[in-house]
Amino acid sequence: MATPLPASVEVVEVGPRDGLQNESTPVPAAVKIDLVDRLAAAGLRAIEAAAFVSPRWVPQMADGAEVMAGIRRTPGVVYSALVPNVRGMEAALAAGVQEVVVFSAASESFARRNINCSISESIERFEPVARMARDAGVRLRGSISCALGCPYEGAIVPAAVADVVRRMAELGCDSVDVADTIGVGTPGAVRAAFEAAARVLPMERLAGHFHDTYGQALANVLAALQLGVRSFHASVAGLGGCPYARGATGNLATEDLLYMLHGMGIATGADLQAVVDCGDYISRAVGRANGSRAARALLAARESAQAARASH
């Protein structure tokens, strides 16, 4: 039986990190800072702003400390960053990050190709990071890649997702993201994965992170909502992809998610029109088409209204 829909949900904006990290052309730190500030001003209260990873592996994220130093810290906004190890954690803490994200996968093959170790080894690597987070009073979030499908192994069984959720809960993660990295999931797969995960961690501590490769992201959000999931990731203008998954398109666009949720009467705290402006800004800045259908429609409607007023 479906859980009653909530009055509000948390939208975690991942565009500045997960969205921009795969852009081939360097994005200036000033643009990233401006984007984060615009997103906060638009009412988004959870923003993944940076990553403290090796610049050799992810050169686009080499300016994490500069970005975190340059943003205006809006009260009530949680600014998070991805960290792969103790060195990254030290840099994140020095930069004043309020939440750190550690990551593994539900697929052994993907883990070995993505982070060069097994799932068990990846969790072990994060044990000192978890201790540092506890000691510093910083939130720890776990993210599970390829939870609904893997480019190397195909479909992922729900028990594999539950196993990694359990390991991350034991590590001390406050919440865990169930991520459809290559966007192959459907509502049935979402239901199975989250029901399995909820047997080891309460549903309110799980989040959905869906890519839209097969056009299923919003349907997957609805399926998760009906199960009781209350936190969802999205990327402004649909920025992002996965360098390890051929053909994987961007994250679910924040504008599309907000349009659906607001249309259902579910509050997010975000101003949709202001987020549309954020997406338009960053799309122009990186020279790519806006990946949000809702944003493109709303921008077109706005232009039509402006043209109509100008003709009178």
Image (spheres, grey):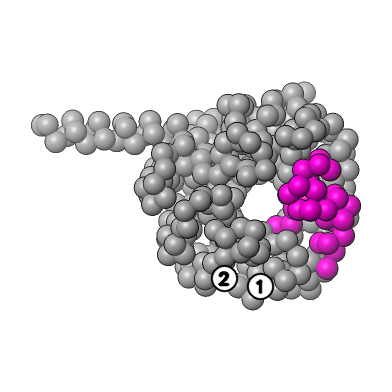
Query: Within the image, what quadrant is residue 28 found in?
Result: bottom left
Disc 2 designates what residue?
Answer: 65
Span colored in magenta:
101-128
Secondary structure under the numbered disc 1 in the rendered image? helix
Q: How crowded is mark 2: few (under 14 residues within 10 Å), some or many (20 or more)?
A: many
Q: Is residue 49 magenta?
A: no
- Amino acid type, mark 1: Ala
Is 309 displayed left or right of 170 in the figure? left
**Amino acid identity at mark 2:** Ala
Residue 48, position in %: x, y?
59, 56
Q: Which residue is drawn at 59% across and 50% down?
A: 18
Contact between labelled residues 1 and 2, with CB atoms less than 8 Å apart:
yes
Q: Name which residue lies at 76% across and 53% down.
A: 115
Residue 178 seen in the current view: no
Q: In which quarter of the image is the C terminus?
A: top left
Q: In which quarter of the image is the N terminus?
A: top right
Residue at the image point whose x is 70% and y is 33% from the top: 224
